[in-house]
Amino acid sequence: MAQADGLALQQTLLQQLRGLRRAGVTHLPPASQPTDPDLSSAQPTDAGMNASSPPATGDSQQQLDQLRDCVAACTRCRELADQRTQTVFGVGDANARVLFVGEAPGADEDRQGIPFVGRAGQLLDKIIEASQLKRSEIYICNILKCRPPGNRNPLPDEADACREYLDGQIAAVNPEYIVCWGAVAAQNLLDTTVSIGKLRGTFHEHAGAKVLCTYHPSYLLRNPSMKKKVWEDMQLLMAELGLSVN
Ligand code: URA
C-alpha cells in the first residue's frame, strides 16, 4: 500500500473511532474474522448493491445497537425529548453501501419509530424502487432523531447535539455512498450554507464516502416538476453502483 493510501486510511479510521467515542461507544468487540491480507485486492464479483460488503460480522450492527440505546435515552434537547413519542434512530442494512440521510422524523415517524414512513417516505420508496434499489439494502436515518414540534426545521443547536449520533451511524455503516435528502440534510452533513440547487447534480465527499445531495421528497410532493432533477441525481448514483440506467 502506498504511504499516501496508508495515511488516508489511518485518517478515516481515526475519524470513525472519534465519532463512535463521541457517541458513547467506549469499547469495540474483538474482530471475529481473521484479517485476510488479500482482501484489499479482492474485486466484487457482481455489481449488485451489496457486492462489496464485507461478510456480516455483526460488528456494525453491534455498534448501531449500542448507539440506538444511547439515542433512546438522550435528553440533550429538552423540548424535543419532552415532546417525542420515541426516538427515531435508523433502519436498514448495517453494512449498506448506500446510506440515506433525511431531515428529522415527522408525526408518522414519531409514532412508529421508523424513518420515512409517512407521505414523504412513500414517495421515497417509489424513488428507491425506480432506482432498482431495495429499502432493506440501504441504511436510512435522519439529521435529528427526535421530531421537532410542528415539523419545524431543526435548530442549529439541535443538529449539533444530534451530530455525534449521525457520525456514529456513518462510522458504523461505513457506506460508500451517502444520499442527503433536502437542504437540511445536505447543509448539515457537509457543514455548508450552499443551496441544495447548487449542491445537487454532483458528488461531494464526507468521511470517505461519495455524497450525493438532492431534493427532499416532501419538497417533491409540493413541487412535482422537480422530480426530474431527483431522477437525474439518482441516475448518477445508479451509474456508480453499476445498475443499468435506461
Ligand atoms: N422527513 C424526513 O426528513 N425524515 C423522515 O424520517 C420523515 C420525513
Image (cartoon, grey):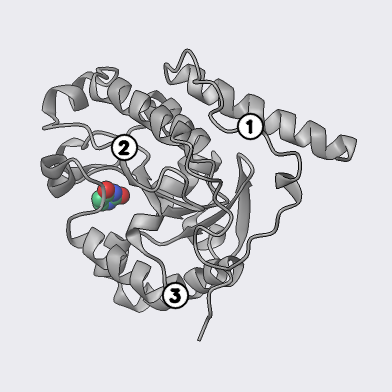
Per the image, the residue denoted by label 3 is: 231
Quarter of the rendering occupied by the N terminus: top right
* Mark 1 crowdedness (10 Å alpha carbons): few <14, some 14-19, many ≥20: few
Relative horizontal placement of residue 81, taking residue 183 as reference (left or right)? left
Per the image, the residue denoted by label 1 is: 34
Identity of the residue drawn at 26% across and 47% down: 115
The correct choice, above or below, for 182 with respect to 76 in the image is below
State the image quarter where residue 89 is shown: top left
Which mark's residue is nearer the viewer, 2 or 3? 3
- Amino acid marked by disc 3: Trp
Per the image, the residue denoted by label 2 is: 154
Please tell me whether mark 3 sits on a helix, a strand or a loop.
helix
- Amino acid marked by disc 1: Pro
Relative horizontal placement of residue 114, taking residue 55 as reference (left or right)? left
Please tell me whether mark 2 sits on a helix, a strand or a loop.
loop
Identity of the residue drawn at 47% across and 48% down: 186
- Amino acid marked by disc 2: Pro
Q: Is residue 102 visible?
A: no
State the image quarter where residue 38 is shown: top right
Disc marking residue 86: none
Q: Earlier in the sequence, mark 2 or mark 1?
A: 1
Identity of the residue drawn at 44% across and 75% down: 231
Say if mark 2 contacts mark 3, CB within 8 Å: no
Please tell me whether mark 1 sits on a helix, a strand or a loop.
loop
Q: Earlier in the sequence, mark 2 or mark 3?
A: 2
